[in-house]
Amino acid sequence: MRYTFTVSAAHQIPGYPEPLHGHNFTITVAVEGRELDRFGFLLDFYRLREICEEVREGLDHTSLNETEYFRNNPPSAENLARYVAEKVATKLPEGIALSYVEVVELPGCSVRFIP
């Protein structure tokens, strides 16, 4: 099961020869589990969307460099995927595991973080 959302944000990798710039990052969160509930769901899609939207709201229309996490971690697409994975994993119900988080920075340029 997966949910995809977009985050519009700016970033600049400290020390890397590229100026501050922005992207419309497309982020996919995939979860898995071994049991279905009495309705036949692994996890209600609305609940997964709710979890992802909580994370999205903290990133959308920001400069990632100004987010506390990215003050200590370069705001690369790889670290963005790891950040989203860590945030989402803490909100998942028991029995549901995070499979991966994929971040598309530009068409054809993506990273996948597997916890």
Image (tube, helix red, strand yellow):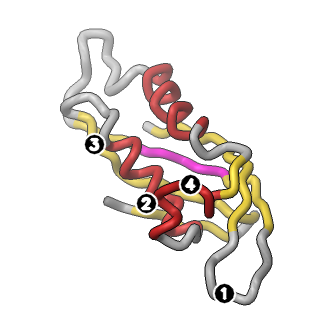
Q: Quadrant of residue 114?
A: bottom left
Please report the residue visible at 33 percent of the width from the left and 43 percent of the height from the top: 89
Quadrant housing the N terminus: top left
Report x, y in % for residue 111: 54, 67
Q: Amino acid at mark 4?
A: Thr
Sequence-first disc among 4 and 3: 4
Tell me how far mark 1 sits from mark 3, CA to CA: 34 Å
Q: Which residue is mark 1?
A: 16
Q: Earlier in the sequence, mark 3 or mark 2?
A: 2
Q: Earlier in the sequence, mark 1 or mark 4?
A: 1
Is residue 88 positioned above or below 16 on the image?
A: above
**In the rendered view, would you say 104 is above or below 18?**
above
- Residue interval drawn in magenta: 26-30
Mark 1 nearby-residue class (10 Å; few <14, some 14–19, many ≥20): few
Point 63% across, 77% down: residue: 13
Amino acid under label 3?
Ala
